Amino acid sequence: MGRYAGKRIVQGIITVWFIATATFFAMHAVPGDPLSGEKAMTEQIQSNLKAKYGLDQPLMTQYAIYLANIARGDFGISFTQENRSVNDIIKEHFPVSATLGILAIFFAGLGGVLWGALTALYRNRLPDTIIMFLVILGISVPSFVIAALGQLSIVNLNDLTGISWLPIGGWGTVWHMIVPSLVLGLSTMAYLTRLMRSSMLEIVSADFVRTARSKGLPPTQIFTRHQLRNAILPVITVLGPSIAAITTGGFVVEIIFAIPGLGRYFVQAVQQLDYTVIMGTTVFYGGFLVIMVILVDLIYGLIDPRVRLE
Amino acid sequence: MTEPLLSVSDLEVEFDTYGGTIHAVRGVNFDVHAGKTLAIVGESGCGKSVTVQSIMGLIPVPPGRITSGTAMLSGHDILQSSTVNGQDIRGDRIGMIFQDPMTSLNPTMNIGSQIAETLIVHRGYTRKQAFQRAVELLDLSKIPEADKRARQYPFEFSGGMLQRAMIAMAIACEPDILIADEPTTALDVTIQAQILDLLTDLQRENGMAIVLITHDLGVVARMADEVMVMYAGEVVEEGTVDEIFYNPGHPYTVGLKAAMPTNNPDTDLRLTPIDGSPPDLFDPPPGCGYCARCPEAMQICKDTPPDTFQLADGHTARCWLHHEGRQAAQT
């Protein structure tokens, strides 16, 4: 297990380095730079500023400085926002995005496994048909539509009852988190439900489940130890990529629900060619996702001994 | 003969499928005696596995359905309930091992825990006690380094070792009957012999009855006390192993024997296969099921199901060849 984890971590570091490099060169390939704005600056001022920020150096030198800074955990200072270092921006807004994302993953995983197992047990009967219909909806309707519908439902609910049950936007309390994270996790939940259903159907008729029944185990024990545990493996495999889907999908949901997450800064930075913020958030998100995927792999190893011991 | 341990009578099992109803088992009777081995033989699809799985309650319902019959264990019909005198049948009174050991064990649980599960459920052992006992059982099943092996997972075992572990699991609660559904079919010949030896040893020590399903007559000759030949969901011949081998009374049994290779290098006889395939069980033939493939079929075989004829003490065959009239015509 230790060696396995070590291998994964080295792979992860290489991945992050690759993300950093690709973003750096892609960004510098975009015409213009943070200083070329509408306001006219004299040549002299511009070259002075460039020298100040190191933008006059050859690209490879900039790259080397940049990598050295990242290795020290310093993402630099924003080009467009006053007095803010990228580290500050991340520190302030990432916890919001992360809370939202983790809640969404939690809903998606729990719901997917639950609904998937349920549809498999009620195969081809009414509950199966209804849930599978909703699943198709969940997969095909984009999250900004669902987000708007979610808000509309809250408004209607509050209107009808005359009590403000849930806020329609903003951030701060647990109540602010419920609807956005449900919306964010919905399509992943739908996808996981499908996956769980098919893997559960395979397991229900597996030889080792028949063995478990021949041992006279109670049905609940057969379900949890023999069926669920094996059926859940493919779901855990896709949980890593799902985290990526959810965190990037989070940008849209964050804007609709007026949540002060990192996503908004990321989009803004790209529009303004704010080099340091783009690089910082991308590398940070990349690193975060790599850690999540490694975590998922380690969980997989805990559940499936074949991964752990090989 | 002594009172049978398990007495199955008139068992009928059907399956509903899209193509119609399959009459998989059609009126099967047999007894299992303590300490003895009953072999059920017949080719694939003749209802051997369905018969024992019905007794174990492993038939998926629906589509499966037990339409009639009883299976009496200690005076209780176990087709109706899953306990006898407060004891569970599955795993406790009757243990079962399956054909393919590679897929019959849970890949995500270690071997010891899978054996321990049975003991925790049926014997109320604590987790620790049960695991301890599991190690002893593995040792009993002749698995070397049992305490290390108990902590390993199925993918770390070979096929033969897994089948030993399966046996350890099945005998964990010292069952009265061990049902072995083609236990050696998936294993190579040397491992096969070891597994059969192990079963014989365990039977001698525990005095349990074994119901052995197989289509390998070599296994039957080695293991069985009594043999039951099944064809198309029915028992066509039943008797002691000697009677069946030296004095077969049904053309199907004769055919099976002729299709068995010998290990005599001097022989230049050819194997004689049985032509054709078993009848369609969606619509079983009205007469004898074997009629269409039988070299000795007569007119009566087509439309009238044969009576059961007693050939010797405990040896019966369902075939019109043994009818008085036919016997008279022969002489």
Image (cartoon, helix red, strand yellow):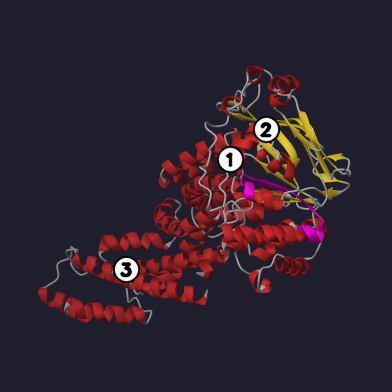
**In this view, the mark in front (3 or 2):** 2
- Residue B258: mark in rendering: 1
Q: Chain of mark 1?
A: B
Q: Is residue A92 visible?
A: yes
Q: Secondary structure at mark 1?
A: helix
Q: Circle 1: is it few (<14), some (14-19), or many (20+) Cα within 10 Å?
A: some
Q: In this view of the protein, which residue sits in the foreground, B265 or B128?
A: B265
Residue under disc 1 on the same chain as residue under disc 3: no
**In this view, the mark in front (1 or 3):** 1
Q: Left of A160 or right of it: where is A289? A: left
Q: Is residue A139 above or below residue B166?
A: above
- Residue A190: mark in rendering: none
Q: Is residue B21 above or below residue A96?
A: above
Which residue, given by chain and number where applicable, does mark 2 sit on?
Answer: B250
Which residue of the protein is positioned furthest toward the left in this rendering? A43
Which residue, given by chain and number where applicable, does mark 3 sit on?
Answer: A19
Going by the numbered disc 2, the residue's amino acid type is His
Q: In this view of the protein, which residue sits in the foreground, A75 or B263?
A: B263
Q: Left of B305 or right of it: where is B83? A: right
Q: Residue at x 46, y 68 (%)?
A: A294
Magenta span: B203-218
